[in-house]
Amino acid sequence: MSAASAATKEKLLEGALRTLVEQGIAKASARTIAATAGVGQGLIFYHFGSVDDLLAAACRYGAEQRVARYRDRLAALGGLTELVEFARAMHAEEREAGHVAVLGQLLAAGQNSPALAAATADGLGLWIAELEAVLTRLLAATPLDGFADPAGLARATAASFVGIELYEVVDPQGAGRAFDALEQLAGLAALLEGLGPLSQRAVRHGLRRDTRT
């Protein structure tokens, strides 16, 4: 692919994302996206085949950009409480930038578009991979290491985040309380992390006994 062709595709991807954020998926037509990107409509079909395929590619592209934006901050987290605090701050940033609304629209549109459904799942998969790596590292310092499933927790966390984003539209106060509850759970995990060696062994023994019953 030539540099000019790659630059045009990037303009279209950025144009599609801007259209979703600023005008919503209902107005994400070839004409609107092309105007936002500053290129001809025909280039959408030349490079992507259809508007839905462009939107799907833009969804994956946008997720890659968002994950890359937060990767260093995730890597610097030192505990589960910090992870929840980061999630709250990231949620506020993403909402302010319009990406929360876009995710809700993509989830709704994915019910009738397999391409958009697959792209949204791929985007969430990028977040899940990052969360799994962070949770594996953070849980290793707690008595929960070996008992909690980082992969499952990463998926549950991503699902909770999506749910809170959609729930916030109808009940902002309730969404805030959900984050507060997650912080309480993280605080309990932090207490476990702060236990001495003997206490941690006692917790591990109790967990092993419970898993056998």
Image (spheres, rainbow, N blue to C red):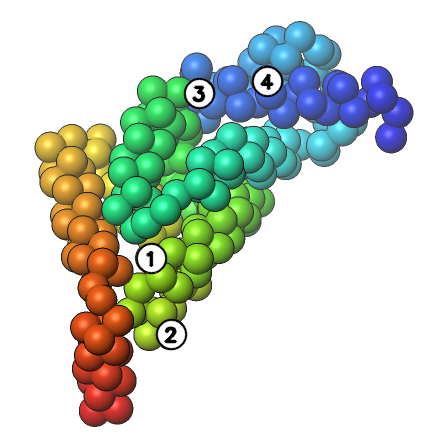
Describe the element under mark 1 as helix, strand or loop. helix
Alpha carbon separation for disc pair 3 and 1: 26 Å
Quarter of the C terminus within the rendering: bottom left
Residue 159 sits above or below residue 9 on the image: below
Say the numbered circle drawn on residue 15.
4
- Of circles 1 and 2, the one toward us is 2
The spot of residue 171 in percent (x, y) is: 14, 34
Nearer to us in this view, 97 or 69: 69
Mark 3, residues whose alpha carbon is within 10 Å: few (<14), some, or many (≥20)? some
- For label 3, the residue is 21
Closer to the N terminus: mark 4 or mark 3? 4
Q: Quadrant of residue 84?
A: top left
- Residue 150 left/right relative to 207: right
For mark 4, does the 10 Å Cα neighbourhood hold few (<14), some (14 to 19), or many (20 or more) residues?
Answer: many
Q: Position of residue 209 (x, y in %)?
A: 22, 88
Label whose residue precedes the other's in the sequence (3 or 2): 3
Mark 1–mark 2 distance (CA, rounded to whole Å): 18 Å
The mark nearer the N terminus, 2 or 4, is 4
Looking at the image, tell me whether mark 3 or mark 1 is earlier in sequence order.
3
**Sequence order check: which comes first, mark 1 or mark 2?**
2
The three-letter code of the residue at mark 2 reads Gly
> Which element is circle 3 on?
helix
- Numbered circle sitting on residue 117: none
The image quarter in which residue 37 lies: top right
Residue 158: x and y, percent?
A: 37, 49
The answer to which of 17 and 211 lies nearer the viewer is 211
Residue in the picture at 66% in, 21% down = 12
Q: 110 left or right of 158?
A: right
Residue at 76% x, 19% y is: 7
Q: Which residue is mark 1?
A: 156
Tag 2 residue: 146
Label 2 to label 4: alpha-carbon separation = 45 Å
